[in-house]
Image (tube, rainbow, N blue to C red):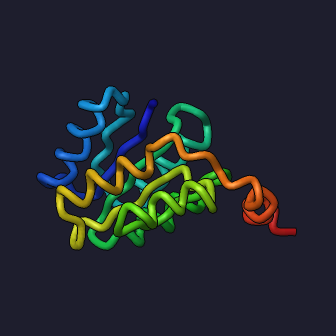
Amino acid sequence: MRVAFGTDESTDLTSGIVDHLTSLGHEVVGPVDAAWPLVGQYVGRAVATGEADRGIVCCWTGTGVSIAANKIGGVRAALCSDAETARGARRWNDANVLALGLRVTSSAMAREIVDAFLADEQVDPEEVHNIGLVENPE
């Protein structure tokens, strides 16, 4: 899987996430280290255009990059602090970008969240209509 990755601050955690992705055999697009709006936009565009299958964005709280990514059409970014939330974001919201907060995420938790987000979880067919309402709210 091709995963676009970006952060507004390179840390041991962000390096560890990239290392974990490559150790699992994923191709990392980027990584980008820039201001959080640019990170969100870059990763969002990579996912929206098909350059990447999924994306992961990081900033201090995870909120800014998720907001910036969600401004790109076709992106459904989810800020997740645990594996079950990441799993649910994929299953019920078809999230295609994962946002992580650097301030609150340990390396072990990041691996669990990333693994859950990248698992081959099928979108709940009963949610497809609701997901469509997000894409086309009118």
Residue 130 x/y as whole percent: 77, 65
- Based on the displayed image, in which of its 4 quarters is residue 32 positioned? top left
Residue 63 x/y as whole percent: 41, 72
Q: Residue at x 42, y 37 (%)?
A: 3
- Given residues 36 and 66, the one toward you in this image is 66
**Quadrant location of the C terminus?**
bottom right
Q: Is residue 135 left or right of residue 23?
A: right
Q: Residue at x 26, y 51 (%)?
A: 111
**Quadrant location of the N terminus?**
top left
Q: Is residue 60 left or right of residue 2?
A: left
- Given residues 100 and 66, the one toward you in this image is 100
What is the residue that sits farthest to the right in this orientation? 138
Q: Residue at x 61, y 37 (%)?
A: 49
- Given residues 138 and 68, the one toward you in this image is 138
Q: Residue at x 31, y 64 (%)?
A: 59
Q: Is residue 51 above or below residue 109?
A: above
Could one spot residue 101 in this view of the protein? yes
Could one spot residue 135 in this view of the protein? no
